[in-house]
Image: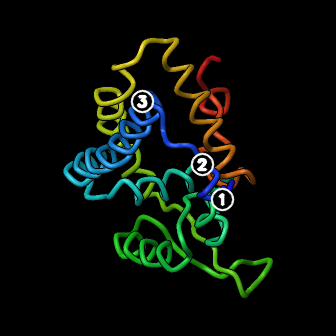
Amino acid sequence: MTTIEPRTVQPFTGPEATAWARLVAVSELLPTVLDAQLLRDVELTHFEYLVLSVLAASPERTSRMTRLASQTNATLPRLSHVARRLEEKGLLERFPCPEDKRATNARLTAAGSAVLEDAAPGHIATVRANVLDALGPDELEQLAAIGSRILGRLDPEGRLSASQCDSAVLGEPR
């Protein structure tokens, strides 16, 4: 993350202030919309859905808790709390890492996969209705490029799953 000495920073220009205000508004409003749909449809928060989605994309649907925390931008205590809730619902299981007994792994269960499958249509429809359908093809490319550049500064190590996201990985044509 880049740090700048505050005394050397110029005030926002009009276009910068507008862009920043709109980005902040989107970042505040979108999680509420995503949570509402997922809670209504499958009784998951968007963060819980993200955790299950990252596990689904992991080899053998399994990840070390520390890696999963990094990929979801969660602290280990927050992830542990969420994993406990998901475990109580039967959506994931935790177990000692076979390579390092001090570490804990999380694995997506069959029930977790089923919930993801049930959640996907509504989640995709919500994302389309609130974000993707508002943009043309060129704007989608611009949004992906803008997100990539910002993530390059906020996540220079590329630890978040979104930093590693590529349309080819998702099975979409480039």
Quadrant in the rendering for residue 88 = bottom left
> How far apart are the alpha carbons under marks 3 and 2?
15 Å
Contact (Cβ within 8 Å) of mark 2 with mark 1: yes
Place of residue 161 in the rendered image (x, y in percent of width and height, measured from the top left) = 61, 49
Mark 3 nearby-residue class (10 Å; few <14, some 14–19, many ≥20) = few
Place of residue 37 in the rendered image (x, y in percent of width and height, measured from the top left) = 24, 45
**Image position of 159 with respect to 152: above or below:** below
Amino acid on which the number 2 mark rests in the picture: Val
Q: Secondary structure at mark 3?
A: helix
Amino acid on which the number 3 mark rests in the picture: Gly
> How far apart are the alpha carbons under marks 2 and 1?
7 Å
Q: What residue is disc 2 on? A: 9
User: Residue at left 32%, top 58%?
Assistant: 45
User: Residue at left 80%, top 77%?
Assistant: 99
Quadrant in the rendering for residue 104 = bottom right
Q: Quadrant of the N terminus?
A: bottom right
Q: What residue is disc 1 on? A: 5
**Image position of 54 with respect to 121: above or below:** below
